[in-house]
Structure formats: structure tokens, C-alpha cells
């Protein structure tokens, strides 16, 4: 039934569906492989893996000059008959920046290694990634813009499967070969990213050869004019997402970073669902936001957020079972981290709903202000709380930061709407506040329910029934 609908769907729908499926498969592979890694690798090695990805995500924003953060689609439209030349030109720009930063990192790798907590080998690996990964981003963004999804799907899923298999194999071999001068974290990261960076390297060569334009002042000015103002937002977003793991590693240790990272990943499983929910809601919002009344938007947004709230609470309450599958008893002892993290994950959905309004009205500066405020709160609270209360505090500081983010996005969205003659936003704001408070309270109840297994199972069953009922309502509302 679904396959037949997809066959008859428009090119835009097919493309969006396939790219969403590709993302779900790639993320799913990370979850599926986690039980292997947590049972072979130590918590300290898992911490190094989390630390590498955290540092890379922050450094890459600066090294790429945020060239992939929003303006690329506009460039595809602006330079419709010169897309090949544009790609190679901006790839040259990002490559020059990557060579400068990467060269600096490698040249000072002993000092950098001590500062960031990564070995010189991983610094070299990261520097290579800074050079070639923008090619993957540019190529994928163009494929999406042109609704070309078949090759992108095969390359994305294929490289994810190969990278996962290679990293699992490398960890198994390294764990049984103690004479190897390589930690399990280095083995896993090297095997994984040599596949990912290798594919990106091939695309780097392809884009350069196809475009053959290494400098074009018009392309560079256009790109930098769009991307440079977004660097602040992009850096703030990454700091908010990963600074807790970096600070735990620096203040407590890699083992605690590994435990926190695994618990964070388990608590964020619900984001699989939210990604699909939000991507399907945005076109509906943008098509109807300028009409009077907004009753359809209000009802749909409340139902979708209620559905995601129930999923978030269900994952939180079912936390011990999830951790038993994904990890070992060492991680299970920290299961109380899941409720505050799950609550914070839900608040990202609230933030997304309001940022969608700001994106529509092209008020992305407001999004940057909110992100910087939340990131600043997160770093300051971590500086105070982690030394006092240990790495558990990071879950609560992150929750506090997401509360600030959601409140700020709500305030800025309200301002944007008032500037256009509306008294409120297009959502049921008061109900969303009640829903947020209720979700926060319900997730935190998980810590008490962990002590009463039978009661928790009954509560989870009731929540599952509620999820099904809300799904029925969402489907009925969609068909009207």
C-alpha cells in the first residue's frame, strides 16, 4: 500500500521520503551497532569516541565557514547554469580554510592533543576530515535540491553500512590483538572514518574536476555573505549539543564521558520520530501560515507535539530495558540520566516548532540569539555544576539550557508575529506550555518508577495505548 503510494507520488515527495529513510537507516545502524561496542570497548574508549565527534562537530563549523548552513540552496537557484563551477569554487574556499586549520592542528599536535584529550593520530584523522567532508555536504545538498535521490541513497546507506562493518571488525580485531599499538577507540574511529572520508575524498576530486573553477570572486562573495552571519548560530548550536561531553572529559574523565554519551544517545532515540514528524509538518505550516484562523495549524501542531511527548516519556520510563539491550551494567547504573535528557530532547521539538516560524519569516537572526543564549547558559552551568555534582549534573544543565532555548524561541517567534499584526503565534501557546510542563514532570517520574518494575510496566503499557490513540487522531486530522 505504502509502496504503491510512493510510486505514484510526486518527485518532491519521493525525494523527501527517500532522504528521510536514508537518515533513519544511517542513525539506526549507529543504534544497532552500539551493543557490540559497549560490550567490547571500555567506557573510557567510548568516551574518546564521543570526544572526537564532539570536537569535530565544533571545529568543522569554523573550518567550513558555515558554507553548508542554509545558503547553499539559494546559490543553486542564483547560479542555476553554473552549478558545477560554483561547487568547485566554494569547495576550494573551504579547502583553503581546512588546510590552514588542519595544518595548524597537525603542526601543534602535541599541545593540541593535551588540550582536547585526543591522540596525535586522531588529530591527523580529524584534519583530513576537515578537508574532504565539505565535498560530501556540497554534493548531497545539490542532489537534494535537484530531487536526485537514487545515487545519494545508495552512497549514503552503502557508506554507512561499510563504515559500521569496518568499525565493528576493527574493534574485534584490535581487542584480540593486544600487541597492536592502537587503542580500541582509535581502531574504531580510524576504520569508520577512513570509509566516510574516503568516499568524501572521491567526491572532492569529482567536484574539482567537474567544475574546474578554483576562484570566482562573485561566488565567494555571495557564499560568504550568506554563511558568515550563520557561523555564530552554527557554533552556538554545536556548543549546546556537545559541550557537555567535552567538559565532562576535561573535568571528570573519558569513562564518564563514555557513559554519558551512551545514555544521551539512548535518550535521544525519539529524535528518529521527531525528524520525520517535523519534516512532514513544515510544508503544511509554510503553505497555510498566511491564511487567517490557523485552526488547522493549531490542532495539527498540538497533536504532533502530544504524540512526541508520549514517545519521549515512554522511552524515558522504558530506560532500564533500553540500556540492558544497548549496553552493560556499567551503563545501567547511570540510567537516572535518561529522564532529564529525554525531557530536554522533547523541548528541542518545542524549539523547532517556533524556529519554523522564524525561518518562514526569514528572521534567522532571532534563532541565533536564542541559540547563543542557551549555549552560554549551558557552558556556565556546566562550569559550576560538574565540579560540584559530577557528570550527572550535565543532564540537568542541558535540560535547563533547552528550557532557555524553547522559551527564547517562543518569545522571538511571538515578536515576529506581532510585527506582522498578529497578537499570538500560529500555535496554541498556552497548551504547549502545559504540555511542556506535563512532559517534564512525567519524564522525571521515571526515576521513581525505576524502583517499581511492575507499576512501570503497567504505566508503559498505558502510555503505548495513548500513543496509538493519538496516532489515530493525527491520521484522522490529516485526512480532513
Image: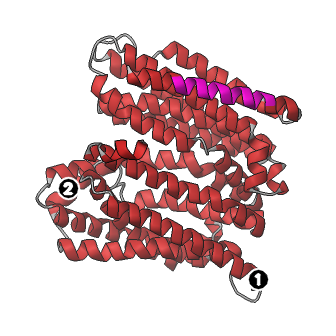
- Sequence-earlier tag: 2 or 1: 1
Q: Position of residue 134 (x, y in %)?
A: 37, 64
Q: Quarter-wise, where is residue 448 in the image?
A: top right
Circle 2 residues within 10 Å: few <14, some 14–19, many ≥20: few
Q: Residue furthest left?
A: 81
Q: CA distance from mark 2 to mark 1?
A: 53 Å
**Residue 122 in magenta?**
no
Q: Are marks 2 and 1 in contact (CB under 8 Å)?
A: no
> Which secondary structure type mostly characterizes the magenta part of the structure?
helix
Residue placed under numbered mark 1 in the picture: 176
Q: Quadrant of the N terminus?
A: top left
Q: Position of residue 434 (x, y in %)?
A: 60, 16
Residue 372 visible from this viewpoint: no
State the mark number for residue 221.
2
Q: Quarter-wise, where is residue 463 in the image?
A: top right
**Residue 460 in magenta?**
yes
Q: Position of residue 237 (x, y in %)?
A: 49, 45
Amino acid at each position: 500500500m505504502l509502496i504503491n503510494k510512493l510510486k505514484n507520488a510526486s518527485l518532491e515527495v519521493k525525494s523527501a521520503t527517500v532522504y528521510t529513510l536514508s537518515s533513519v537507516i544511517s542513525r539506526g545502524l549507529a543504534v544497532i551497532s552500539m551493543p557490540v561496542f559497549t560490550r567490547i570497548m571500555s567506557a573510557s574508549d567510548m568516551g574518546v569516541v564521543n570526544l572526537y565527534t564532539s570536537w569535530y562537530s565544533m571545529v568543522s563549523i569554523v573550518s567550513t565557514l558555515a558554507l553548508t548552513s542554509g545558503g547553499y540552496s539559494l546559490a543553486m537557484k542564483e547560479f542555476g547554469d553554473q552549478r558545477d563551477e560554483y561547487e568547485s569554487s566554494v569547495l576550494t574556499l573551504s579547502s583553503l580554510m581546512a588546510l590552514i586549520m588542519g595544518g595548524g592542528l597537525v603542526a601543534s599536535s602535541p599541545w593540541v592533543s593535551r588540550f582536547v584529550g585526543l591522540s596525535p593520530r586522531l588529530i591527523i584523522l580529524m584534519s583530513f576530515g576537515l578537508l574532504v567532508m565539505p565535498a560530501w555536504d556540497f554534493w548531497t545538498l545539490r542532489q537534494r535540491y535537484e530531487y536526485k535521490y537514487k545515487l545519494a541513497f545508495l552512497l549514503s546507506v552503502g557508506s554507512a553500512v561499510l563504515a559500521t562493518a569496518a568499525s565493528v571488525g576493527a574493534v574485534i580485531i584490535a581487542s584480540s590483538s593486544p600487541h597492536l599499538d592502537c587503542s580500541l577507540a582509535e581502531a574504531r574511529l580510524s576504520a569508520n572514518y577512513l570509509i566516510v572520508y574516503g568516499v568524501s575524498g572521491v567526491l572532492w576530486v569529482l567536484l574539482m574536476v567537474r567544475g574546474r573553477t578554483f576562484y570566482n570572486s562573485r561566488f565567494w562573495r555571495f557564499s560568504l555573505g550568506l554563511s558568515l552571519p550563520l557561523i555564530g548560530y552554527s557554533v552556538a548550536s554545536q556548543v549546546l549539543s556537545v559541550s557537555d561531553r567535552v567538559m565532562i572529559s576535561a573535568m571528570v574523565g573519558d569513562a564518564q564521558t563514555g557513559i554519558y554519551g551512551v545514555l544521551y544517545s539512548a535518550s535521544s532515540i525519539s529524535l528518529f520520530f521527531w525528524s520525520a514528524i517535523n519534516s512532514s509538518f513544515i510544508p503544511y505550516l509554510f503553505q497555510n501560515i498566511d491564511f487567517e484562523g490557523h485552526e488547522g495549524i493549531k490542532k495539527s501542531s498540538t497533536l504532533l507535539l502530544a504524540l512526541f511527548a508520549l514517545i519521549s516519556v515512554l522511552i524515558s520510563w522504558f530506560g532500564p530495558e533500553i540500556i540492558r539491550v544497548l549496553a552493560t551494567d556499567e551503563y545501567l547504573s547511570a540510567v537516572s540520566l535518561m529522564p532529564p535528557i529525554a525531557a530536554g530532547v522533547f523541548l528541542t521539538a518545542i524549539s523547532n516548532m517556533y524556529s519554523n516560524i522564524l525561518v518562514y519569516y526569514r528572521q534567522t537572526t532571532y534563532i541565533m540569539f536564542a541559540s547563543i543564549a542557551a549555549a552560554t547558559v549551558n557552558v556556565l552551568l556546566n562550569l559550576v555544576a560538574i565540579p560540584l555534582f559530577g557528570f550527572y549534573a550535565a543532564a540537568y544543565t542541558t535540560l535547563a539550557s533547552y528550557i532557555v532555548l524553547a522559551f527564547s524561541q517562543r518569545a522571538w517567534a511571538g515578536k515576529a508575529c506581532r510585527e506582522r499584526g498578529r497578537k499570538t503565534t500560529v500555535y496554541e501557546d498556552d497548551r504547549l506550555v502545559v504540555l511542556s510542563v506535563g512532559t517534564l514532570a512525567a519524564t522525571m517520574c521515571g526515576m521513581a518508577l525505576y524502583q517499581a518494575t511492575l507499576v512501570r510496566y503497567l504505566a508503559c503499557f498505558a502510555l503505548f495505548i495513548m500513543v496509538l490513540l493519538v496516532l489515530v487522531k493525527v491520521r484522522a486530522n490529516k485526512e480532513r
